[in-house]
Image (cartoon, rainbow, N blue to C red):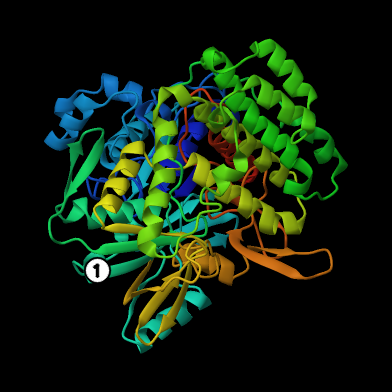
Amino acid sequence: MSSIAIVGAGPRGVGLLERLAASAPELHPGDLDVHLVDPYPAGAGRIWRHDQSPLLAMNSMAADVTMFTDDTVVCEGPIVAGPSFWEWAGRTDPDTLEPALAAELRAVTASTFPSRRLQSEYLGWVLRDVASRLPDGMRVHVHRATAVDVDDDGGTQVVRLDDGRALRVDAVVLASGHLDATPTADELALAARAAEHGLRYLPPEQTTDTDLSVIEPGETVLVRGLGLAFVDLVVLLFEGRGGRFEPDGDELRYVPSGAEPHLVAGSPRGSLYHAKPAYQLRGGRPPLPRFFGPEQTDDVVAAGEPIELLDTMWPHMAKELAWGWYHELFLGHPDRVRLPWEEFADRYTAAGWDSPEMFALLAAAVPDPVDRLDLTAMNEPLTGLTATSLAALQPQVRARIEEDLRQHTDPAHTSHLGMFVAMLSVYGEVGRLHAAGVLSARSRAFDLSRWQGFFNSAASGPPGFRVRQLLALSHAGYVDFLGAGMLVDVAEDGFRAGSASLPGAEPVRSTILVDARLPDPSAARTTDPLLAGLVRDGEAVEEVLVDADGTVLRNTGLIQVRPSDGALLRASGEVHPQRFAVGPHTTVKVAGAFTRPGMNAQSLRYNDAVARAVLRSLAPVRARSAAA
């Protein structure tokens, strides 16, 4: 009999379990025990657990979430279909849920952004469904505990839990998701200076776990970060304190509870992430990859010479993104263009990105500038925007957010969704180049973070209704935007903040600063005892990027794994044959633990590769057992 421990029983761990079950009949027929270890509820894990505010929502529509492979997924293991969230919702009896979730389930549509608590129900069902269909001889055991240590004992992996139990297994997979970490040196210094002056500083962490009671009603709060953590912060500080939104014509009006603070928020980009598109493709899924796929990258991989991603590949990446955009524009909105799709596609294919021929083609074929993709404006939405005061800046920022929201919710602009689909394809191909080891250290240090930032802002934004709520709060004077290039310092009279959008303006002062984002990844600073022990003992190692001349460029904080299958690397550079890791704390990036159906999703393909590698690692164990 063989056994596997998966440390982390959220959607990544459950996804691995599903792929193990799919391939076990082929690669490991016979007895197999799989142990899921997590202090949070199995299936949902920490992020999606039921025990959180019912106000918090997903940033994906019900029809765009699945945990199962389908016929588009190209992987070595068997395809085992299962319901998307939307399909699950249609076949689930609401009366089996608590009243609030039952009411939500009855109201769900394909374009609904469900609550995280309802997603928790789906993920819990997925685990139960997978467990009910395990192949003969395979069993799953759930341990509601924290894994604190793992040791080698004569080829057996001994995973110790905080409840005193020890699991003796043949392979271990670390699937713990986003890890907490102690503050960085800069954050500790900022906290010390703040304490010296009697100020309050809330460092990066999961917003749902932050003690927000230290934020007083009526006080001005400086916030760094305008991503999804900021959106959660706003939900908890306003609706979470009893405020509500009411319809006001086509917009919303905020009705206060009296417990609200005043937020002044900024970031490098200065604006919210782009809202998730709230419509479906009209022209069908664009044929991808087309300009950034194996045809363009196989030679690069085969050559094996280090390249700079954005210097070398950006023309292909950008052309792919625009291909998705214009495919949807021409086929979904033929009344908005001046050429037949076939003619445009031929000329587009022949033209170089950013070439005079491309500019001329787009000017002739796409009459409305709004219908032409501007990647620079998308990445830097407040370019050229300045004001002499914070109050004067607000109407300008709101106008840009309102126009962006209009385009992401008006079905006349489904080209945004075409680009979103292309962006997922590009993300996967960038991951392939990274895994192949052909990106230079400098490119991995800087290009990947720039690309990830652009991807997050364009593809990982909040639902449109959240943007409407933020606009209502801004109109009501409860949320102000600092603009692009936020700067913060500490003085005796409090934190002071300004931005590049407010040159010469009086800084905003506050006695509290919130860093609204997740902690930067750091295996060395992690509070996870198991991973911290592995790093301390040299059994896991952080990725340190070193330039060709020996200059240390960056410590990414990510644990190094073999790209093809997630096998854990030791400090010696050797691969541990029985330990694996998958998730955002590793050097292999995949876009989320669950995905959109019908997309040949990278996350499903990688889960399959890791699961099959884990099963294959058991063969030597079985051979030793047979010999004994």
Q: Which residue is mark 1?
A: 215
Residue 133 at least partly seen:
no
* Residue sitting at x 48%, y 31%: 21
Residue 540 at x, y percent in the picture: 61, 62
User: Whole-percent x and y of residue 560?
Assistant: 64, 56
* Residue 445 in the image: above or below residue 123: below
- Give the residue displayed 20% in from the left and 61% down from the top: 260
* Residue closer to the observer: 597 or 605: 597
Image spot of residue 184 (x, y percent): 50, 73
Going by the image, does 561 lie left or right of 378? right
Q: Is residue 233 left or right of residue 574?
A: left
> In the displayed structure, would residue 338 be above or below residue 150?
above
Quadrant position of residue 364: top right
Q: Would you say residue 463 is visible in this rendering?
A: yes
Tell me the SS state at disc 1: loop
Q: Dot 1: few (<14), some (14–19), or many (≥20) neighbours within 10 Å?
A: many
Nearer-the-camera pick, 621 or 613: 613
Q: Amino acid at mark 1?
A: Ile
Residue occupying the point 55% across, 13% down: 334
Point 42% across, 23% down: residue: 411
